[in-house]
Amino acid sequence: MAVRQILVIGDERLRQKAKRITRFDESLKTLIDDMLETMHEANGLGLAATQVGVPLRVAVIETPEERDENGTITRPKKTYILCNPEIIKRSGEEIMEEGCLSVPGYAGRVLRATDVLVKARNAQGREVRYRGSGLLAQAFQHELDHLDGVLYVDHIQNPEDLWQLSREEEPEEEFEEEQEM
Ligand code: NI
C-alpha cells in the first residue's frame, strides 16, 4: 500500500471523464488499497481515483462511527468501494456544506439530493446497491461528480456560497471533526 499524491484544483487531470472498469484484477485492488490509505492519511471522508490522477471509475467512501452520549458505538464506521457507480434514484433537495481534498482551504454550500440509491460493483466485480441519505448521499454525489471531472465548486453560482477556512482560528476539536471528500 502507498499514499498517493492528491491533485488540487487547477490540475487538468481533475477534469478528465474517467473510464469504466472492465477488469477487476490485482492492479485494481492495489489502486483501491492505495486510495483508502491516501484518504485515511488526509483525514478524508471520500476519494475518487480521478483525484490521484487515475482516470478510472472508482471511488471510496468511509463514514465515521457514531456514538451516543455514553460513548457506546451506535453505528460502526463503514467503508464503501464503488466501481462503475451510478445514481439510479434520487429524491429530496437540501443545501449542504461541503469541502474537498482537491480544493484545500475552502468550503461551500451546494444543493444536493437528500436521498440517493447507488448501483456499483465492488472490488471483485460483484454488483452492489447502497442507499444513502444526508452525509452519505452527499458523499455519493460528490465522489461520482469527480469521476465526470466535476468539482463541487462548479455547482456554486454565488460567491458568498464559497468561503476560505481560517484553520488557525478554529479550536482543535472542530478541526478534528472537519472532513473533506
Ligand atoms: Ni472531492
Image (cartoon, rainbow, N blue to C red):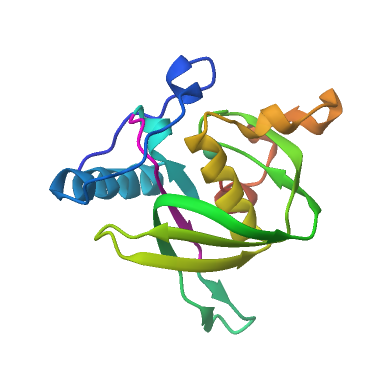
Q: In the rendered structure, which segment of residues is drawn in magenta?
A: 54-64
132 lies above or below 1 = below
156 lies above or below 26 = above
Give the image quadrant in which the ligand numbered 1 is located. Answer: top right
Q: Is residue 61 highlighted in magenta?
A: yes
Q: Position of residue 10 (x, y in %)?
A: 53, 15
Q: Where is residue 156 in the image (x, y as percent from the top left)?
A: 76, 30
Q: Is residue 46 left or right of residue 175?
A: left
Residue at the image point whose x is 56% and y is 29% from the top: 104
Instruction: Write down the quadrant of residue 152 in the picture.
Output: top right
Residue 180 appears in the rendering:
no
Q: Nearer the viewer, residue 3 or 168?
A: 3
Residue at the image point whose x is 82% and y is 26% from the top: 157
Q: Nearer the viewer, residue 101 or 88?
A: 88
Q: In this view, does 161 lie to the left or right of 66?
A: right
Q: Is residue 101 left or right of residue 3?
A: right
29 lies above or below 49 = below
Residue at the image point whose x is 17% and y is 43% from the top: 27
On-image quarter of the N terminus: top left
Residue at the image point whose x is 59% and y is 84% from the top: 70
Q: Position of residue 145 (x, y in %)?
A: 56, 39
Q: Which residue lies furthest to the left in this view?
A: 26
